[in-house]
Image: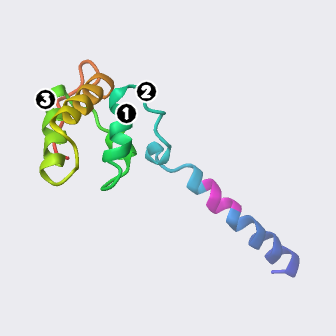
Amino acid sequence: MHKVGLTIMALALPLIGAGAMAQQAPATVAAATPPPGPGLDLINERCGFCHTTGQVFQKRRSEAEWAATVQGMADRGAEVSPEEIKTITAYLAKNYAPAPGAAPSAGGR
């Protein structure tokens, strides 16, 4: 191959790779901005020490599931008062409930 052909290929390969990366699954797309509410500040202040808040906002759970999850985090050492647990749970249940008709959550934290 000619020197010009090699140069063109060398320039094209990064572009081909970038195009392939752009076609990855939508899981790499940033989540929407969480809605404002009294629990949002607490989540940002208390939950981000162990995991990203994005992980929290990707979940969809019932109020009972959120209550169990938040209590489980408190049991593991999250510094939240009982009143803060109620506020966080109410916020998550209101804004991150399963979609109507969605299958029940598999649980987990």
Q: Position of residue 80 (x, y in %)?
A: 22, 43
* Circle 3 residue: 64
Q: Look at the image and say whether residue 11 sits in the magenta stretch.
A: no
Q: Is residue 106 visible?
A: no
Does dot 3 land on a helix, a strand or a loop? helix
Tell me, yes or no, whether the two marked residues, 2 and 3, touch with CB atoms within 8 Å.
no
Q: Nearer the viewer, residue 33 or 24?
A: 33
Q: Position of residue 47 (x, y in %)?
A: 31, 47
Q: Nearer the viewer, residue 24 or 5?
A: 24
Tell me, yes or no, whether the two marked residues, 1 and 3, touch with CB atoms within 8 Å.
no
Query: Which amino acid, by three-letter code, is at mark 1?
Result: Leu
Label 1 to label 2: alpha-carbon separation: 8 Å
Segment tinted magenta in the rendering? 15-19
Tell me, yes or no, whether the two marked residues, 1 and 2, touch with CB atoms within 8 Å.
yes
Instruction: Name the N-terminal-most of marks 1 and 2.
Output: 2
Q: Is residue 51 above or below residue 101?
A: below
* Circle 2 residue: 35
Residue drawn at (62%, 62%), measured in percent from left and top?
Answer: 17
- Lateral position of residue 15 relative to residue 75, left or right: right
Q: In front of the other: label 1 or label 3? A: 1
